[in-house]
Amino acid sequence: MTTLDYSTKIGSKRFSNPIFTASGCASSGQELSQFFPLTDLGAIVTKSIMTKPRTGRNTPRMAETPSGMLNSIGLQGPGIDAFLENDIPWLVDQKVKVIVSIAGETVEEYGVLSRRLRAVSGISAVEVNISCPNVENRGQVFACHPDTSVAVIEAVRRNIGGELPIVAKLSPDVTDIVEIAKSVVNAGVDGLALINTLLGMVIDVNTMKPKLAGKTGGLSGPAIRPVAVRAIYQVHQAFPNIPIVGMGGVSTGRDALELILAGASAVSIGTASFGNPNAAMLVKNQLSDLLIERGFKDFRDAIGFAHRGV
Amino acid sequence: MIPHRINKSAVQISAEVISNKKFGPYHHMVFAVGEMAANSRPGNFVAIAIGDSQSAHILRRAFAVYRAIDKGPMGGSIELVIAPHGQGSTWLCSRTVGEFVDLIGPLGTAFGVPSSNANAMLIGGGYGSAPLFALAELLKNRGCRVDMVLGASTAAKIFAPLEGKRSVSSLTLTTDDGSAGIHGQISEAIPRLIREYKTEVIYSCGPMGMLSAIAKIAEDFDIAHQCSVEESMACGIGVCMTCVVPIKYESGIKMVRTCIDGPVMDAAEIIWDKKTVTDLLHS
């Protein structure tokens, strides 16, 4: 039997395999644990947590689109206190690797969240979500500008301490994603998460009004996969040594392999889990088969393979 | 809310279509689901994947269970009543006997049953009546009086199968166009019927507008009201946070998932008024 070293690294942290959940697509983890052991994941990435409890947006929050969907949740969550009291201990108890995703309305809020996380044991990395499209003011999407992106990452770095890897989650809704990546890499991130959803809209032609209560929403699902592949390819080309957690419409092992060949060191499963709670396990098993079929003995040899000899 | 393990009985299976019959504007479909049927309670729902693995419809569709039979001739089975009005439900209704679908269930909360005998009124709008028949049987077996009120826009859209009527003490029909039963909206008939049948608890399932109107009546009469709500759902298993409804929480509002904390909810907890919700969200 052919064996495959399936492990991967983000910064100083090693993960047993490269299949993660995507932020906001695994809720607290308990929901999916009925369907497969969470320890079979490389890591679970939590929903983006904020300092205070947040109600989120009104409904409708969802619209299905061809090979995709729009969501407009508005970062509903329990706030950092309840999250650290309930969600984190449960996940740590399950012995699953946890990447905590954080989101803030201000640079200071990211700093506060980072300070809260520095004392928490059992966390493998922090994902800094600076690209949620479901905010009231588009100007608040930090990842749209290099200077605001850097301000957030510096606040996180100052407050988090230790060697917890910092992963910045970027938006594809920018003119030049490499420019944004460059700014946060220079600010010292250990990895990048690419890509967040794309801002979209659906208009109901019967009511003749936007279908979502929040009017716009984040587009996800297979429809956006080519955008993810492009973004990962461009950023990996510019920064081949920065680990990328790739995501965007992955629902099969073949899709995951595509992101890895473009330059991803790990792949997050998001919207696919909505249609199939076992999607992450399906992807993990199919990807392993595809890598072995192609003669890879070490998963890491496949990262960015599409760039070689080009 | 009682803490419970989320999705504790849910399994994902490939379920064979063992019957598919047209019933007026609806389809009555039966799926072989094995042991899942034994865990299904009135009020629970199932989530079914649409199309094959290459389908452009990436999200499941949720359907309330009409009946679950633990040990039938084909083993455990689950029955659904489906209105083929969208692309997903139309696809499902065109499945033929012997085909398989990817099905997750049972999901969500079930109707709570009173601990002592009570006069129960079951109110269903359109095919929203489907989950009420199994509930009627359960309540009748517990010694409750069961009065059922079914309404729809027109007579053909009332789902009331013969075998379902066995468990009810009375059946009242209402239609918006007057083509059957009482002429008018279902909620208009309810206050008089509550007085007549000395109703102590209401169970309802149907469009949100109807549920909202009944919630107001139940509040006026000060009687318990459990409703099965309907909100656009992407996952059905609690991970996507799209299918929420607003409930009263401390001094404000909280959005809860109708797939985990519902679909059966205490109507008195829900904030039905849209303007109140908007105001609370922006306060």
Image: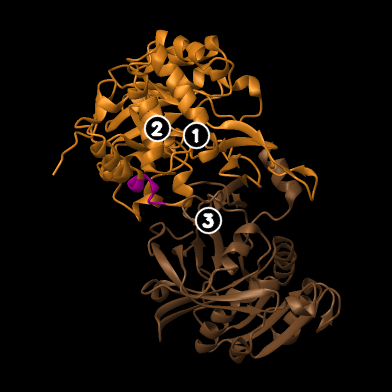
Residue type at tag 3: Arg
Neighbours of disc 1 within 10 Å: few (<14), some (14-19), many (20+): many
- Residue matched to label 3: B60
In front of the other: B128 or A77:
B128
Instruction: Determine the chain carrying the residue at label 3.
Output: B
Along the viewing direction, whichever of A302 and B166 lies nearer the viewer? A302
Distance from disc 2 to disc 3, alpha carbons, whole Å, reads 25 Å
Q: Is residue B267 above or below residue A93?
A: below
Point out the image quarter for the C terminus of chain A: top left
Chain B hue?
A: brown
User: Secondary structure beneath disc 2?
Assistant: helix
Q: What colour is chain A?
A: orange
The disc numbered 2 marks a residue on which chain?
Answer: A
Nearest-to-viewer mark from 3 and 1: 1
Q: Is residue A305 magenta?
A: no
The outermost residue toward the front is A309
Is residue A278 part of the magenta span, yes or no?
yes
Q: Quadrant of the N terminus of chain A?
A: top left
Residue occupying image coordinates x 30% and y 41%: A41
- The numbered mark at residue A225 is 1
Q: Amino acid at mark 1?
A: Arg
Magenta span of residues: A277-282
**A105 to the left or right of A19:** right
- Neighbourhood count class around disc 2 (C-alpha, 10 Å): few under 14, some 14–19, many 20 upward: many
Q: Residues within 10 Å of mark 3 (few under 14, many from 20)?
A: many
Q: Is residue A242 left or right of residue A248?
A: left
Question: B148 or B91, which lies in front?
Answer: B91
Which residue does the numbered mark 2 point to in the structure image?
A: A258
State the image coordinates of residue B266 (x, y, percent, origin top left): 59, 64
